[in-house]
Image: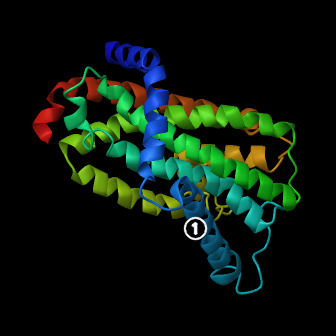
Amino acid sequence: MGSLVTVLKEQIKSFYLVRRLSFYEMKSENNNNYLGILWELISPLIQIAVYAFVFGFGIIGSGHGRKPVDHIDYFSWLIAGFCVWYFINQAIIQGSRSVFSRIRMVSKMSFPTSVIPTYVIFAKFYQHLMLLVIVVIMLQFSGHLLSIQFLQIPYYMFASILFLVALSLITSTLSTIIRDVHMLLQAVMRMLLYLSPILWLPDPKNTTITFIMKLNPIYYLVEGYRSALLGDPSWYMLEHLRYTIYFWVVVIILFIIGSKVHIKFRDRFIDFL
């Protein structure tokens, strides 16, 4: 538990620095592009258009448009889940390479390496906020007006960030030691796009498949976002209380493991360059 306390103290103490570095990270990523930060919106919107066409009218829709999912038109259902998936996917991939791609610079500074994945994740979070605004506007035009359920969004944002920070403490450390971990993680995230409820939902009658898919914490976050954005009359985190407890248990376990692994190896990170 000592490692966990140390990492938490570093996160809290360096929060102001995390905010400044995350803004710089977001700007520097698009400095050489003519459209600049607009690419953070253009890229996911293109992906949404492709997936909506392929899965809404192509492969599954058979050219006639896909049937509603849980009584919600497929396009609205898709964008409500994809907006958080895009954030999670980008944060996990960039978070895993955050330490080994910056360790040479950080080794010359008095800087807690545990906050490196955090500020990279926050940079992606700011981009997520921009995409979320676009998605909310699109949902208004498709008939899904804002409701009181939207108040759940800050909770799911908080849950997403804590999950990503906890996971990135593990993946960034392992990727620094073994570079192949980052490549493996990229392959896993490509698979998870199709194994998570982003483009499709499992048949509720097939309880085994549904149970296996729900073991993935991303399932909880995606369905929570959908519930909040699409105005589901129930409060997802309360209606699925056992699943909420499971999610937070997983996050705490990841934090404990991530803190221990990170503290154990961070003094030797420079040796793995």
In the image as oriented, which residue stretches furthest toward the bottom?
63
Q: Whole-percent x and y of residue 59?
A: 62, 82
**Callout 1: SS:** helix
Q: Which amino acid lies under the numbered mark 1 shown in the image of this protein?
A: Gln
Q: Is residue 129 visible?
A: yes
Q: Whole-percent x and y of residue 218?
A: 55, 46
For the point 42% across and 50% down, which residue is it?
29
For the point 58% across and 57% down, which residue is it?
38
Q: Quadrant of residue 24?
A: top left
The answer to whether residue 165 is above or below residue 178 is above
Q: Whole-percent x and y of residue 236?
A: 74, 39
Q: Quadrant of the C terminus?
A: top left
For the point 34% across and 44% down, which residue is it?
96
In the image as oriented, which residue stretches furthest toward the left?
271
Left or right for 216, reference 242: left
Left or right for 64, reference 38: right
Question: Exactly how many numbered labels are in the figure?
Answer: 1
The residue wearing badge 1 is: 47
The answer to whether residue 128 is above or below residue 112 is below
In the image shown, does 95 or 62 lie closer to the viewer? Answer: 95
